[in-house]
Amino acid sequence: MSTRRRPPAPDPLDFLSVDSSLSPEETDVRDTVRAFCRRELLPDIADWFEAGTIPDPRGLARAVGGLGLFGMHLEGYGCAGTSAVAYGLACRELEAVDSGLRSFVSVQGSLAMAAIHMYGSEEQKTRWLPPMAAGELIGCFGLTEPDSGSDPGSMRTRARRDGPDWVLDGTKTWITNGSIADAAVVWAATDDGVRGFVVPAGTPGFTANVIHRKLSLRASVTSELVLDGVRLPESARLPLAEGLGAPLSCLNEARYGILWGAVGAARACYEAALSYAATREQFGRPIAAFQLTQRKLAEMVVDVNHASLTALHLGRLKDAGACHHNQVSFGKFSNVAAAQRVAAKARSLHGANGITLEYPVLRHMLNLETVATYEGTEEIHMLSVGQAVTGVSAFR
Amino acid sequence: MNIVVLVKQVPDTATERKLDPADSTVDRAASDGVINELDEYAIEEALLLKEKHGGEVTILSAGPDQATDSIRKALSMGADKAVHLNDAALHGSDALQTAYALAQALGTVEYDLVILGSESTDARTGVVGAALAEYLGLPQLTLANKVDIDGTSVRIQRQTDEGYDVVEATLPAVVSVVEKINEPRYPSFKLIMAAKKKPVAKLGAADAGIDTARVGLANATTEVVDFAAAPPRAAGTVVKDEGNGGVQIADYLAAKKFL
């Protein structure tokens, strides 16, 4: 007789055992971020969202920097040098709390720091990266403009030479961490194409204004940057960044974090729905016992696990140096769309309770509107995939 | 100042914990293993002392293969190296036998101070520290909520119900800590990446000079005779406020010795 043991029943919270293939270090990173989120972030997040801000961004930055989260997948300069999968897991766990918190980390690590890491001079890297990694300094990234969103090549911000210096004029908008940043990586058009600059906060002519009245990503500081004759030395220019490809490559890094983060938001909504369905009783039994509820839960499980598998697979490709930006586009739009479906179902499953901040579902649902839009809209990523499979560009 | 921290892997208190009906030992397959919570405070205290006085922090853990996960976590908090005592002969050892085995394993390490959590969340006997000190012939300072080292001696605040006692001993000594002592740090990602490169000495019973006739379930000095699932939680007490609600709550808390 064979004594073959039956495989264990699936874990409702990791149905396809996606995390079973993680390395010990990756598991440790996941557990550390999860514990940090549970103790330090989750108890306050609804209040921050309601208040429409992060009340102590410096304190949060130092705590996050203390873990080594900022630029964790970068090498050297005080960065931890983890795998891309470990970075993704951190984004997943953060966004399971709130997309605004993942954005806080993404912008610092994948946009500001990655830009300096990839395109900066040795002096710029030494000056900015270690304190940014430690969370002592906060960085932001200015590409989008009021009239230049999906088409960043149409940017109006100009950098012109004036003797040995550069003078920058223009406006950037939807800049996460803009008004709390110590330095902004700003992209501007020059006679030779797009160039990047590190603008220290406090440079004359540089101002950052908070954007108010957001209904999404409220636990996040979003700003407009105004550059009015900002004079910078040549040493502030990122010497290796030539053309629009440079900022787009940074966005590709950030999108990679988003495709993982969306899995976290989706999982949090699904977990909330599962728990609510088990305890909410109507007609004398838990609503989990109703077929329509089970259908919703089953569809959520499928969406969460598909997104999770996509993220892990792209992470493994990225660690092997084989993840193309079109594949990141695939992951960004498909995982965010999956998270939006899960959030909407979880919201409806919570009934009236689902519209309050007592439950996380509407907060996630609203956040995901931003996540679906920033770092490349769903439409742009679809067109990117469309171009990749047909060989024909539909948008430029 | 070389410090050894004793770390035990226990079933996660956040999950349903079970005993194995076959031999009444902890069913380690039934839930995830985590570092015993109080041991995290012990690790933190050792790291703080190291930051102040220099030296090395060594983790000593007795447990099966999966205890490597907890050892790795202790290393990723900042400990320098580890000793993993792992032998099938140790399975089912009770608190006294564990203390004996740990004392033997400590013979392979140089140390000035041994720190451990005052009890584990699984068996909760709270005697390993005291028994270990006895086996080692060292002074024991238990239930510390503050530890200071001064060259050749260690002074602690021993937490009591009323306040604390100040207790002092010469080094080397065994100190057990309570959770009021500090706030354990999170592992940092840099240390997580470095943890796999840190040395972990693997010891069997023979390597530590452990007499296998003195350890294991068959030779245990205590025996789990029976066990039963905890009864379902009883309904709470509802205090109806008829002008004296505060007094009723205070009386209730006082009766439970919370006040």
Image: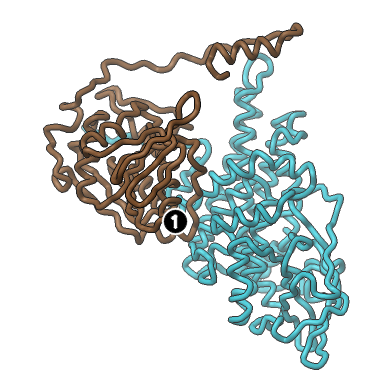
Chain colours: A cyan, B brown
Instruction: Look at label 1 and name its amino acid.
Output: Glu
Q: Is residue A216 or residue B240 the one in the foreground?
A: B240
Q: Secondary structure at mark 1?
A: helix
Q: Which residue is mark 1?
A: B51
Asked if A163 appears above or below A245 in the picture, the reply is below
Residue A198 as seen in the image, left or right of residue B48 = right
Task: Say above or below: B125 vs A42.
Answer: above
Q: Residue furthest bottom?
A: A163
Picture layout, residue A203 above or below residue B25: below
Residue at image point 59% right, 64% down: A133
In this picture, residue B3 sits left or right of residue A357: left
**Camera-nearest residue between A210 and B61:** B61
Q: Quadrant of residue B218?
A: top left
Find residue A371 and report its horizontal and vertical position in percent. 71, 54
**The N terminus of chain A lies in quadrant:** top left
Quadrant where the C terminus of chain A is found in the figure: bottom right
Residue B114 location (% of width, % of height) = 32, 44
Q: Quick one: B203 or A390, which is closer to the camera?
A: B203
Chain at numbered mark 1: B
Q: Residue at x 72, y 63 (%)?
A: A376
Q: Dot 1: within a 10 Å radius of its alpha carbon, few (fewer than 14), some, or many (20 or more) residues?
A: few
Is A118 rendered above or below residue B63? below
